[in-house]
Amino acid sequence: MTDNRQAFIDGLHQIADFLAEHPEVPLPALGSFVSGSYEPTLAILTQVPRAGEDRDQRAQLAEIARAMGKAEKSTQHEFAVYRRFAGVILAAYADRDEVCTRVVTGTREVTVEIPDPEALAAVTKVSVTKVIEDVEWVCQPLMKPAAPGLQFVEVPA
């Protein structure tokens, strides 16, 4: 096991312990719609192979799906295989066109309403002056007293 992999795994354990010890801290937002609804999700992104590599995204996903056992799949935006672990989903993603073949199963003719291009060309344009705010965010350090009008809660060390 590589040092980076072990450090990541150790970090996940430490985060889980921290969240268990501090119920006042909200859960991190690791969301995805892979399952059709927004649920906490950790993403594994497959890599497009470099020249000379033979492990394409399809092979990477197949390997991950085998390791997951009873994985589900989603083809909504990308191709994903995922598995639920209690309150978290572990999902592996690949470009849909790298894993799937697009097949046209038929065609149909539909009528849609669009603005008449000739009528749009005839509409005169006018110049309007607007006031646009230029904004800069100035943030006070969280552990120091806030500027007047702002309230920050001091967090004990």
Image (spheres, grey):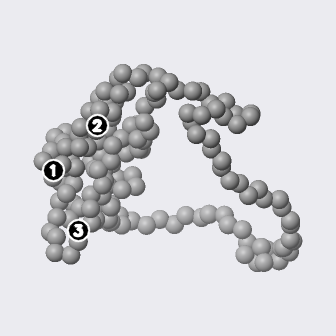
Q: Check disc 2 and report the residue beneath it.
A: 12
C-alpha span from label 3 to label 1:
20 Å
**In this view, the mark in front (3 or 2):** 2
| Label 1: how many Cα within 10 Å (few below 14, some 14–19, many 20+) | few
Residue at left offset 23%, top offset 71%: 50
Which quadrant of the view contains residue 86? top left
Q: Which residue is mark 1?
A: 2
Of mark 2 and mark 1, the one earlier in the sequence is: 1
Do the CB atoms of the residues marked 3 and 2 lie less than 8 Å apart?
no
Towards the viewer: 55 or 115:
55
Give me the residue at 28% from left, 37% from top.
Answer: 12
Residue 68 is left or right of residue 97, and the answer is left
Residue that carries the numbered disc 3 in the rendered image = 49
Q: Earlier in the sequence, mark 3 or mark 1?
A: 1
Residue type, numbered disc 2: Leu
Residue type, label 3: Pro
Q: Position of residue 25 (x, y in %)?
A: 45, 27
Q: Residues within 10 Å of mark 3 (few under 14, many from 20)?
A: few
